Amino acid sequence: MYGRCWPLYPASDHVKYLPYEQTLNITNLNFPLPVKDIPKFEILNPYISVNVLSLDDKDFCIDYCSSARNRPHHVNLLLLSQRNKKHYVCIKNMCRLVRGRTHYNGVAYVCNGCLHPISSKAVLDRHTPECMRNPPQAVKYPDPKDCTLKFQAHKKQFRPPFYLVCDFESFLSPVDDDDDEHYNRPTRLIDEHRVCGFACHRVTDIVEYQTDPVVYSGPDSMSVFYDHVMSESKIIGKILKNQKDMLPLSNEQQTKYDAATHCTACGINFSVKNHKVCHHCHVSGNFLFPACNNCNLQ
């Protein structure tokens, strides 16, 4: 009982807790009190709000955040665990506890909902209502040594030798729906798009395989479009199957290759394990740029 009163009536001499022995209402509560039962404790003691934090490998987690605000007493507890035993410790100063989250040197006001230190109480008062609309969350900062987002999907930088650009034309057609339920729905379908034509253009840098755009306007446009796309797929598939070896390098290309020290795609320096290779177009056989073996295999 004495430990439960300590956050409200701190004292150095435990004998002074005796007058407050019956202060808290703990009817039908079992101790040590599980975190899930803290809302019951708050209902029995409407003048107290409680927050519970725990410590994982790197940072603090919010196990329970009270939805009650502006109660006469607020208590922040840290739940420590060791060998299947748990113990609550009173947090005297939240600012000092999360000091490492900010470079601000003054006294900070900590939000109970996200543990974010804020420089002024006025800003905290504006922040708290918005923050408390969401479940408790702890703001975790990235490792300073690895906090820069880097592009990793280098294979997506390689331009495909072929791709199709398509565009559709359609007109709005009224929907004829005489169903009685149609008028009782919250939203009603009035018009729908009906495809009346399309244009499809095969795009490639290889001149011998370039074609004029195909334009169609008429009945059954989607079926015609599907047949055209499948036809293009077969044609392009046959072209890609006949892979060509790289053409001999020109003097300028050879000079560019010899002078390269890093991969043009990923920017990593060449090494014994990831050596330099000639990246070329397998359709035309033309040399493209010096690349590392890892990027070339992608």
Image (tube, rainbow, N blue to C red):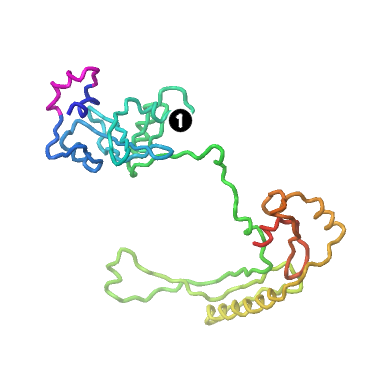
Find residue 75 and report its image quarter.
Answer: top left
Q: Amino acid at mark 1?
A: Gly
Residue 142 % position (x, y): 50, 40
- Left or right of 102 in this view: 133: left
Badge 1 local density, few (<14 within 10 Å), some, or many (20+)?
A: few
Above or below, 191 against 139 in this view is below
Identified at 19% across, 26% down, the residue is: 2
Which residue is labeled 1 in the image? 100
Residue 247 % position (x, y): 81, 67
Identified at 23% across, 25% down, the residue is: 6
Residue found at the far right of this picture: 251
| 297 vs 208, nearest the viewer | 297
Find residue 137 and report its image quarter.
Answer: top left
Q: Which residues are magenta?
A: 10-23
- Left or right of 62 in this view: 14: left
Find residue 76 and report its image quarter.
Answer: top left
- Left or right of 223 in this view: 246: right
Above or below, 39 against 7 in this view is below
Residue 25 is inside the magenta segment: no
- Secondary structure found at label 1: helix
Residue found at the far front of this picture: 83
